[in-house]
Image (cartoon, helix red, strand yellow):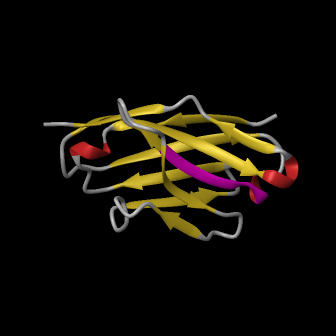
């Protein structure tokens, strides 16, 4: 059983920063691929960034150079540092844990990020 709890969302002005956290519970966090996704009103959920068990990262073109995903194995937590935020980054951000070999594909409840002046 995997549980993911996101935190760190909020209201920020354009150009500002936020750091999202996703605390995971369950066994073998170290082998999961972790990801952040987002869904804006009226749009489909899209991938923002992913990080594999060995630390390989991948980013959506729209966030490259502004967002950084990282993971802390000691704390079973994944982070998303978001800098230079834009109004178009406004969305609900979801954490995902994936390990096909273990049958894991779990989602958190989401955290709202609003970028507005």
Count up the numbered dots. 0
Q: Residue furthest right?
A: 102
Q: Position of residue 66 (x, y in %)?
A: 33, 62
Asked whether residue 32 is drawn in magenta, I would say: yes
The N terminus: image quadrant = top right
Q: Is residue 55 left or right of residue 58?
A: right
Q: Position of residue 23 (x, y in %)?
A: 62, 41
In the rendered view, tell whether residue 35 sits above or below residue 105: below
Residue at (57% x, 42% y) in the render: 95
| Residue 8 makes an appearance in the image | no
Compare residues 74 and 38 and report the one nearer the observer.
Answer: 38
Q: Position of residue 80 (x, y in %)?
A: 47, 52
Q: Position of residue 84 (x, y in %)?
A: 25, 56
Asked whether residue 97 is drawn in magenta, I would say: no
Q: Is residue 32 left or right of residue 101?
A: left
Residue at (80% x, 52% y) in the render: 100
The segment highlighted magenta reads 31-37
Residue at (70% x, 70% y) in the render: 54
| Residue 13 makes an appearance in the image | yes
In the rendered view, tell whether residue 108 sits above or below residue 83: above
Residue at (39% x, 36% y) in the render: 43
Chief secondary structure of the magenta portion: strand
Compare residues 98 and 10 and report the one nearer the observer.
Answer: 98
The C terminus: image quadrant = top left
């Amino acid at each position: 059983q995997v549980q993911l709890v996101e935190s760190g969302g909020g209201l920020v002005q354009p150009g500002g920063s936020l750091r999202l956290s996703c605390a995971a519970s369950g066994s073998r966090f170290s082998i999961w691929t972790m990801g952040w996704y987002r869904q804006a009103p009226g749009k489909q959920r899209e991938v923002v960034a992913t990080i594999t068990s060995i630390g390989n990262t991948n980013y959506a073109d729209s966030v490259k150079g502004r967002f950084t995903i990282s993971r802390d194995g000691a704390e079973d937590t994944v982070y998303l540092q978001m800098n230079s935020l834009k109004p178009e980054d406004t969305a609900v951000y979801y954490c995902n844990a994936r390990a096909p070999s273990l049958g894991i594909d779990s989602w958190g409840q989401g955290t709202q990020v609003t970028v507005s002046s």
